[in-house]
Amino acid sequence: MTTTSGDDQLSRGLRLLSVLADHPTGLGVSAAARMAGLPVSSAHRILGRLVAERFASYDERARRYAPGVRVLELSRGFHRSPAGYSEAAAPMRTLAAATGLPAIAGILYDGDVLLVLAVQGTQHLQLRSAEGTRNAWHATSLGKALVCGQPADTVDALLAKELPAVTARTVTDPEAVRAELARVRARGWAEVDEEGEVGVRSIAMAVPARSGAPRLAISLGAVTALTSADELHAQLPRLRECVEEIAAHMGW
């Protein structure tokens, strides 16, 4: 008779939590098991434990599992920790207040851009920029600002993957994206104009690093109906001040 080690159980539980996080509206046990690569019986047992510990919730009527309240508590703890880029929060609030535009921080994560901090501006129309959202790197100013500073082999690997069209204006040709990355590298900032979201434009800069590739980038987003490209470009000095202040706080 064999038993599952504690490490293996932990790995399975984390895989199930990751699956639930990617499907916040909920999943049945069979679907969750399939996506996590687990037998249904194992998934059912682990999900039951996650529910008991409040890391997952269970809707008896719909028979679906979803992330639980403890996940929110973990998220709050992350954002307050150095790993959660908490040092970026104050400079981003200053930037958003000075420009009236939402300031968003993102990192590269599994070939996408993961939004880790968001500070809303004062514009009447707000952007969809929730923390924890993943976006296609090639369709975002954050992604372009981050990728242009990566090693050549990392850039090649990212460009070798499919570059899906998020909107009708998304650039999907690898060589055209490569050329854009060269322009971003030369001028020190990136921009997109309705490539990632219809009616939205943004600019971004990577936070300077003393060595190695940039780990974090900051963007300013704007609704095209309210802010022209020239008006957004006029905020580049404030964006640069923000990323330099963050770099000083981070000690990178």
Image: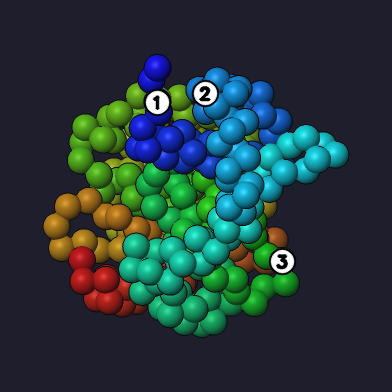
Question: Which residue is at the front of the view, 70 or 179?
Answer: 70
Question: Which residue is at the front of the view, 164 or 46?
Answer: 46
Q: Which residue is tagged 1?
A: 3
Amino acid tagged 2 = Leu
Among the two numbered marks 2 and 1 on one chain, the one whose residue lies closer to the N terminus: 1
Residue 99 visible at all: no
Q: Which residue is tagged 3?
A: 125
**Viewer-nearest of labels 2 and 1?**
1
Q: Residues within 10 Å of mark 1 (few under 14, many from 20)?
A: few
Instruction: Determine the CA span between mark 2 and mark 1.
Output: 15 Å
Q: Residues within 10 Å of mark 2 (few under 14, many from 20)?
A: some
Q: Which residue is tagged 2?
A: 38
Circle 2: element type? loop
Q: Is residue 25 left or right of residue 208?
A: right
Amino acid tagged 1 = Thr
* Vertical arrangement, residue 102 with respect to residue 12, above or below: below
> Which quadrant is the N terminus positioned in?
top left
Amino acid tagged 3 = Leu
Q: What is the x, y in percent for residue 125?
A: 71, 66
For residue 54, which numbered disc appears in the image? none
> Which quadrant is the C terminus positioned in?
bottom left
Is there CB contact under 8 Å for labels 2 and 1?
A: no
**Residue under the image location 67 percent in, 29 percent down:** 29
**Residue under the image location 59 percent in, 33 percent down:** 45
**Residue under the image location 54 percent in, 71 percent down:** 119
Q: What is the x, y in percent for residue 221?
A: 55, 62
Question: Which residue is at the front of the view, 130 or 229?
Answer: 130
* Vertical arrangement, residue 129 with respect to residue 164, above or below: below
Among the two numbered marks 1 and 3 on one chain, the one whose residue lies closer to the N terminus: 1
Residue 91 visible at all: yes
* Residue 11, image quadrant: top left
